[in-house]
Image (spheres, rainbow, N blue to C red):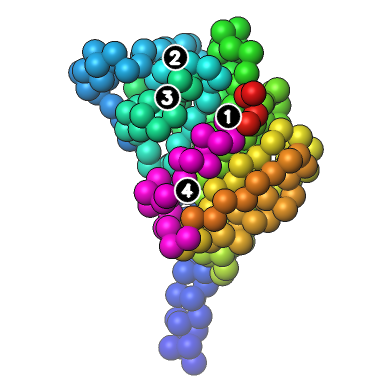
Amino acid sequence: MEGLAAVAKIALLIAVAFPLLMYFAQDSLIFHPQPLSDERRAAIAARGVAESLFIQGKEARLHAWHVKGEPLVMYFGGNAEEVSWMLQEAAGRAPGTGWLLVDYRGYGSSSGSPSERVLIEDALRWYDQMSSRYKTIYVFGRSLGSGVAVQLAAQRAIAGVILVAPFDSLVELGKRYYPFLPVGWMLKHRFDSVSLAPAIKSPLLCIVATADEIIPAEHSKRLYDAWGGEKRWVGLEGAGHNSTDDAANYWPSIRKFLGEKSS
């Protein structure tokens, strides 16, 4: 009996301790900041492809890369993405288009620490900064960035929304990976895109990797089905979560969407 009691105590300890551990570790599980040194940033800026912009956020200095052109596309990357890699890609694949590649807090050359709340506040701040320069602004969110893009589109006038490997909500995605945890109670950063989608009337281009091993397509489909505006689904056959850009119909779909909505 004593042995059984000891086993029961250990099981209870694990049942309590593991959820607590996951709760306190969730920031590091969701966000993987990729900083960029000042020297590297200066070297990239010296190439002349983009200008390096800074604005002051709440308790943080925020950075983004700006490629001049019309219309403007505000880009929000994945949870482990340092967005300067997109400079050559965007300029070469969508010539003439303007881009604002946003560094989340703690990423690239932005200071501070990321959270859902501050990422949305910063996105709104960048939009308000750039709306004085541009009449037509699109948002482009990849993976985690889809959650930022959707919340921005829900609060500002957006010409169109491009989402790559998006999810319905982090709660639903978390339940998929941790069915034994009370994810709905534990999760601080919920990025509940699906609840906002019905009220968003901006046109949507939803690009999904059919073999996405991280965000299965069914989570993207729930968001797509809930979208309140005109929408288009593009499936990248055989592509995985990190190989979307290599698909033949990836950039052509984006160029077509931007061209149609800007004309």
Residues packed near mark 3 inside 10 Å, few (<14), some (14 to 19) or many (20 plus) = few
Q: Amino acid at mark 2?
A: Lys
Part of the protein shown in magenta: 237-259
Q: Nearer the viewer, residue 210 or 54?
A: 210
Disc nearer the start of the sequence (4/3): 3
Circle 4 — which element?
Answer: loop
Residue 121 visible? The answer is no
Q: Position of residue 172 (x, y in %)?
A: 62, 57
Q: Which mark is residue 249?
A: 4
Q: Position of residue 68 (x, y in %)?
A: 44, 14
Q: Nearer the viewer, residue 12 or 222?
A: 222
Q: Which residue is mark 3?
A: 95
Rounded to the nearest angstrom, the CA distance separating label 2 from label 4 is 25 Å
Q: Quick check: 180 above or below 41?
A: below
Q: Which residue is mark 1?
A: 259
Q: Position of residue 22 (x, y in %)?
A: 48, 55
Circle 1 — which element?
Answer: helix
Rounded to the nearest angstrom, the CA distance separating label 4 from label 3 is 17 Å
Circles 1 and 4: CB atoms closer than 8 Å:
no
Q: Which residue is mark 2?
A: 68
Circles 2 and 1: CB atoms closer than 8 Å:
no
Q: Amino acid at mark 4?
A: Asn
Q: Quick check: 8 above or below 211?
A: below
Circles 2 and 4: CB atoms closer than 8 Å:
no
Q: Quick check: 112 above or below 21?
A: above
Disc nearer the start of the sequence (1/4): 4
Q: Amino acid at mark 3?
A: Pro
Rounded to the nearest angstrom, the CA distance separating label 3 from label 2 is 10 Å
Q: Between label 3 and label 2, give the one nearer the viewer.
A: 3
Furthest-top residue in this view: 132
